[in-house]
Amino acid sequence: MSTFNVCIQWGEQFREEGKREQALDLFELARDMATNRSDRAMAWAHIGLTYWQMRPGAKTDLVAELARRAEQAFEISLSLARESRNRDRTIEVMRHIARMRLDMGFMNEALRIGLDAMGHAAEMQRRDLVWFTHLVALAQIRRHLIGELPRSVPVQWVRRELNDYLQIGVLDPNVFAKRAWRRGIVNSHQEMYGVLSPVYLLVHYLRARARLMRHKSIPASH
């Protein structure tokens, strides 16, 4: 494994553990060691995401600066990804930008970008499809909560997020990513169902698991 990949991997682990300053150091080191536009795009995307995730625990006077740095990092990442014509890097940073816009309250813009990125991820059969589905699910939940959508729409997306994880996400070897995806599923249910979320999560899990097992038991047609 290259030093670049080691820095990215350890940076993801530190960020997942809440050690965002250490993660940022590793992502910046990865950026400096990158030998092509695609790798630099990946490093800049991680830098932007880390800055964005640092905002909640930051002092009030630093929040705007962290947001500015995150947005700038995402813009650089997207430019590099497009220059490199790397579709994976492009949709990854699109997903980050969509989440940033969602957190800023621009739900329709976030949904438009998120659906575009998710469509590409599904077409490419990416194992982290659930990561893209989660963003769309959150956007639909928040649109429902302000009265823009009937309840049935976000419910469908919450179920789809769980299904994408059980069908595809569990196959990914990245244990830190899978931990984050599972937490995302829990968060989606909490936003949608509040105090009843554990009950709905269990029901949705059992139903999705049963459908998956039935599908596996059906012999392939010839």
Image (cartoon, helix red, strand yellow):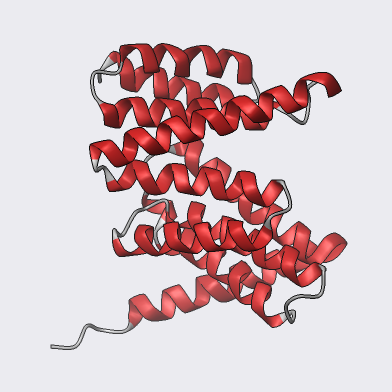
Judging depth in this view, the residue of 122 and 115 nearest the camera is 115
Judging depth in this view, the residue of 141 and 220 nearest the camera is 141
Indicate left or right for 73 with 36 as reference: right
Q: Which quadrant of the figure contains the N terminus?
A: top left
Residue farthest toward the bottom in the current orientation of the protein? 222
Q: Is residue 122 visible?
A: yes
Indicate left or right for 119 with 105 as reference: left
Q: Position of residue 143 (x, y in %)?
A: 73, 68
Residue at 60 percent across and 59 percent down: it is 109
- Residue 17 against residue 187 in the figure, above or below: above
Indicate left or right for 55 with 68 as reference: right
Indicate left or right for 186 with 83 as reference: right
Q: Position of residue 103 (x, y in %)?
A: 70, 47
Q: Residue 162 appears in which quarter of the rendering? A: bottom right
Residue at 57 percent across and 57 percent down: it is 134
Residue farthest toward the left in the current orientation of the protein? 222
- Residue 97 against residue 200 in the figure, above or below: above
Q: Residue 195 appears in which quarter of the rendering? A: bottom right
Q: Is residue 198 visible?
A: no
Q: Position of residue 65 (x, y in %)?
A: 70, 22
Number of numbered discs = 0
Q: Position of residue 21 (x, y in %)?
A: 62, 15
Residue at 62 percent across and 67 percent down: it is 158
Judging depth in this view, the residue of 220 and 53 nearest the camera is 53
- Residue 95 against residue 141 in the figure, above or below: above
Residue at 61 percent across and 63 percent down: it is 137
Q: Which quadrant of the figure contains the C terminus?
A: bottom left
Q: Residue 30 appears in which quarter of the rendering? A: top left
